[in-house]
Each structure stands twice: as C-alpha cells, then as structure tokens.
Image: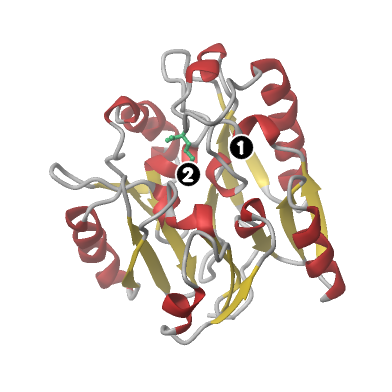
C-alpha cells in the first residue's frame, strides 16, 4: 500500500437531470442552473478522462434531484467490493437501488440496513483506513455497520465528529495517505492531527474538497488560492468549474464513485 493515491481504474458519474434544480441545499444557496450544471458536469468528466480514468456515465435519474451526487450512495472498499449506503436524507434513499445495477456489473455489493444512515460524502479513504464522519447524515449505527464490513478486508474505521457542514469531506480530503487539506472554519485541524496525519488548513472552504490521484490534484475553480498554494508545492493542479454543484452543496468528490486498481487505493 503506497502513500500516494492511485489513479482510479474506473469512475461512475451521473449527469444532473432537469429535477436537479430542486435539489436539497442550504437555504443560503441559489437555485442551480441545470443547463450550466450539465456543461460543468461534462467538464468534470473530461478532467477525469484526461487523468486516465475510465469514466462510465450512467443516464440521469429523472425522479431524483440529487442523484448526480453518486458518491453518497456507495462506499467502494476495493476493486471488487462496495457497500451500498442508506443516505441520511430520506428523499435520497431510492437513489441507491437505482444505481446499484450499474455497480453490480463490476462489484460485489453489500448494503447497510435500517437503522443505519450513512452518506459516502462522510467517508474519507486514507490508505488502509476509512475516516468516517458522524454528521447530520451519518449515524453511529451506519459507522458500525460499515466497520463490520470493512474489517474482514483489513480496512480500519476511524470515527470523526462533524459538528458543522454537510459531510466530513465537505471539510477535509486527502492529498496522500498521511496528508490532509482542511477547512479550519468547519473542522478543527487539531482533531485530525491527533490521528497522526499532516494537516494543512486551506484559505477557502471549497479548497478543502480536492481529488488527488496519480500525478495531479483536481481543485474547484472556486478555490484559486488553494490551487496556487498547491502549485507552489510543485503539484500539477487541474481547476474544474463547479459553481452549479456548489449551489447544491456539492463539491468535486461527490460527483463520482471511484474504483481503485487491484491492490491499490484511491481517494
Ligand atoms: C445533498 O444535500 O444531499 C446534496 N444536495 C449534496 C450532496 C453532496 N454530496 C457530497 O458532498 N458527497
């Protein structure tokens, strides 16, 4: 298991449907523009493909406004196994059985069960460990059921309390297995450092959700200072415009489910 996250061999994405305009979102967010969201989604797919990821585009789910945020409905444990979640928002639960047949073509699927709730946005992969946020969407039962499924595969689960914001990964993501970027206004860096990792506070909240793999880091266009900071560290940064997904409380990671190559891990 290396420190650097591998380029996913494959990723599933789902373009927004017209219903996306009615997605769940914080009351401070404007209604997303679906036409612009579609164009930004295409740009996101192109950024993944340019990085060497084989992207499978699942048709939009007409009835489910938030279905483009595929990351929330499954947790991929390795290149063969995934866990279907039970999303914390009841309106999102039907997305799981809608996406499952696509994942089942490649993966053996397990499932979390009532009373568990868990959103994939609360699950941060760091090498052989899953850090799981206990949040407004993910409860302790969800974390314990995931722990039970991960343990036989040699994957440990660490619980992190998320008192603010939607998900753990709204506030922190990994550059490698020992290095995190964090939005210090949402999550106390000291809590993460207590687990022995290097933690870098970033100047923009949207800079805390990056996708790092292979030779590059994808960063939202809405976080230019974070992009410059990474470039100054010698990182190849790919900036991706995502304003319409930010309006839906989403970020880079939530728009894909990423499959690591055999024997490796990926963010
Ligand atoms: C929701 O509230 O569930 C969606 N509007 C946003 C989900 C974003 N997902 C993620 O960060 N993993």
Mark 2, ligand 1, within 8 Å: the answer is: yes
- Total numbered labels: 2
Q: Position of residue 178 (x, y in %)?
A: 56, 80
Q: Position of residue 128 (x, y in %)?
A: 43, 75
What number is the disc on residue 75?
none
Image height of 8 relative to 73, above or below: below
What number is the disc on residue 246?
1
In which image quadrant can residue 234 be found?
bottom right
Provide the secondary structure element on which disc 2 rests. helix
Q: Position of residue 65 (x, y in %)?
A: 46, 21
Image height of 34 relative to 147, above or below: above
Real-space Cα separation, disc 2 to disc 1, in angstroms: 15 Å
Residue under label 2: 71
Residue nearest the viewer, comparing 131 with 145: 131
Q: Position of residue 150 (x, y in %)?
A: 29, 65
Pointer 1 local density, CA inside 10 Å: few below 14, some 14–19, many at least 20:
some
Check the image and name the residue furthest to the left: 115
Provide the secondary structure element on which disc 1 rests. helix
Pointer 2 local density, CA inside 10 Å: few below 14, some 14–19, many at least 20:
many
Q: Earlier in the sequence, mark 2 or mark 1?
A: 2
Residue nearest the viewer, comparing 227 with 128: 227
């Amino acid at each position: 298991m290396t420190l650097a996250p591998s380029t996913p061999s494959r990723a599933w994405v789902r373009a927004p449907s017209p219903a996306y305009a009615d997605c769940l979102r914080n009351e401070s967010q404007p209604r997303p523009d679906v036409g612009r969201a579609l164009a930004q989604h295409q740009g996101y797919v192109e950024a993944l493909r340019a990085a060497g990821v084989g992207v499978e585009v699942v048709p939009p789910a007409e009835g489910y406004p938030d279905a483009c945020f595929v990351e929330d409905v499954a947790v991929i444990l390795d290149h063969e196994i995934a866990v279907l979640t039970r999303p914390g928002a009841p309106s999102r639960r039907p997305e799981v059985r809608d996406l499952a047949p696509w994942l089942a073509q490649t993966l053996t699927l397990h499932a979390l069960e009532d009373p568990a709730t868990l959103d994939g946005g609360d699950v941060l992969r760091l090498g052989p460990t899953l850090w799981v946020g206990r949040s407004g969407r993910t409860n302790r039962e969800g974390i314990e059921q995931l722990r039970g499924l991960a343990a036989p595969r040699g994957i440990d689960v660490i619980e992190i309390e998320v008192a603010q914001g939607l998900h753990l990964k709204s506030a922190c993501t990994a550059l490698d297995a020992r290095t995190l970027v964090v939005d210090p206004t949402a999550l106390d860096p000291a809590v993460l450092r207590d687990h022995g990792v290097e933690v870098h506070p970033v100047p923009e909240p949207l800079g805390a959700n990056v996708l790092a793999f292979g030779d590059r880091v994808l960063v939202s266009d809405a976080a230019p200072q974070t992009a410059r900071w990474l470039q100054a560290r010698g990182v190849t940064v790919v900036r991706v415009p995502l304003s319409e997904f930010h309006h839906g409380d989403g970020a880079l990671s939530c728009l894909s489910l990423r499959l690591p190559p055999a024997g490796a891990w990926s963010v």
